[in-house]
Structures are given as C-alpha cells and as structure tokens.
Image: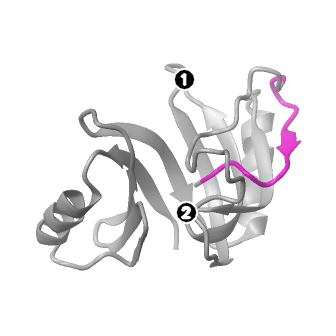
Amino acid sequence: MSRVQLALRVPDLSASVAFYTKLFGTEPAKLRDGYANFALTEPPLKLVLIEGGDDDTRLDHLGVEVDSTDAVRAAAAGLAREGLATVEENDTTCCYALQDKVWVHGPGREPWEVYVVKADADTLAKQPAGTCCSRPETADARAGEPATVDAGGCC
C-alpha cells in the first residue's frame, strides 16, 4: 500500500493527539516521546506529529510511504530522469523507525520524501544532535544525480 504522509510540527503533542484521535476516530499507530503518528487507511494518509517549538502548528515536510526499498529506488530513479535533484538515505533511524528514503524539494522548497519503514526503532533520530524530520540539504545535489547521505536525516 502507498499513502501520502503529512508531517506537522506541533507545540503541544498531547493536545494534538487528542484532537486527531477525535477527528479520525482512532488512536495513534505509534506514540512515543515527542512523536506520534496516525496510519489511516481511509483516507490513505500517514499523519506524523512532531513536538517542537512554541509557535503555531506548521508543516514540517510531506512524504509518500511505499512498501519496499525497491519502490524507493524506483522513485529516486524516476525523479532523477525528470531532472530533479535528490538526496538518498539508507538505513536511517527516524521517527522511531529504520527507513530507506529519497528526498526532493518542490518549487517552493517544500520537502518531500519517498520512504519505506523497514523496522521499528527505539529512538526518534539516529544523530543525537540532529533534528528528527529535518530534511537534508540538497543544494549541492545536481539535477539527475542523487546524493547519498549517511543515516541521520529523518522521516
């Protein structure tokens, strides 16, 4: 199954979880320190909530969850064929999951990821100094040539 992901940075995780539980009529699929996600089948959506900041809720990034690493690789190849700069991450720990992913930016610099969850993990992010779900910078990536980065970016 493939579904769109919407990741929001929220100032109050508990209040956000309570709201989205009522909105969707279901409990989070994953609830950890500073993090929650709702894996909905109807509509097919993964809503990720990342606690952080004192401001209003804001978009963190967008994504498409796929079923396999092969699907991530196919997406990366397709994006490169279209001339888009990409950054690939393999075996990265993010959002309490081990993932493979590829990042691309839209014309407004909105970050998109295509990713697969390979296994559950005990930490939000692999790099203690890193910010989970901050996408890697792609300024040095040239169109059509994916860059590969070490694990440490996030969902």
Q: Specify the quadrant of the image occupied by residue 122.
A: bottom right
Secondary element under disc 2, as helix, strand or loop, is: loop
Disc 2 crowd rating (10 Å Cα; few below 14, some 14-19, many 20+) is many
Residue 13 lies, with reference to residue 77, above or below; the image says below
Which of 148 and 13 lies nearest the eye of the viewer?
A: 13
Residue 75 lies, with reference to residue 20, above or below; the image says above
Residue drawn at (79%, 47%) of the image: 88
* Disc 2: which residue: 95
Q: In this view, does 135 lie to the left or right of 76?
A: left
In this figure, what is the number of numbered marks? 2
* Disc 1: which residue: 109
Q: Earlier in the sequence, mark 2 or mark 1?
A: 2
Q: Looking at the picture, which amino acid does disc 1 mark?
A: Arg
Residue drawn at (67%, 45%) of the image: 129
Q: Where is residue 103 in the image (x, y as percent from the top left)?
A: 67, 42
Label 2 or label 1, whichever lies nearer to me, is: 2
Q: Position of residue 21 (x, y in %)?
A: 18, 71
- Residue 113 is one of the magenta-drawn residues: no
Q: Distance between the residues labelled 2 and 1?
A: 22 Å
Q: Looking at the picture, which amino acid does disc 2 mark?
A: Cys
Report the magenta residues as a range.
142-154
Q: Which quadrant would the C terminus be assigned to in this image? A: bottom right
Q: Specify the quadrant of the image occupied by residue 38.
A: bottom left
Residue 65 lies, with reference to residue 21, above or below; the image says above
Q: Position of residue 34 (x, y in %)?
A: 41, 60
Which of 137 and 41 lies nearest the eye of the viewer?
A: 137
Q: In this view, does 44 lie to the left or right of 85?
A: left
- Residue 143 is one of the magenta-drawn residues: yes
Secondary element under disc 1, as helix, strand or loop, is: loop
Residue drawn at (75%, 29%) of the image: 85
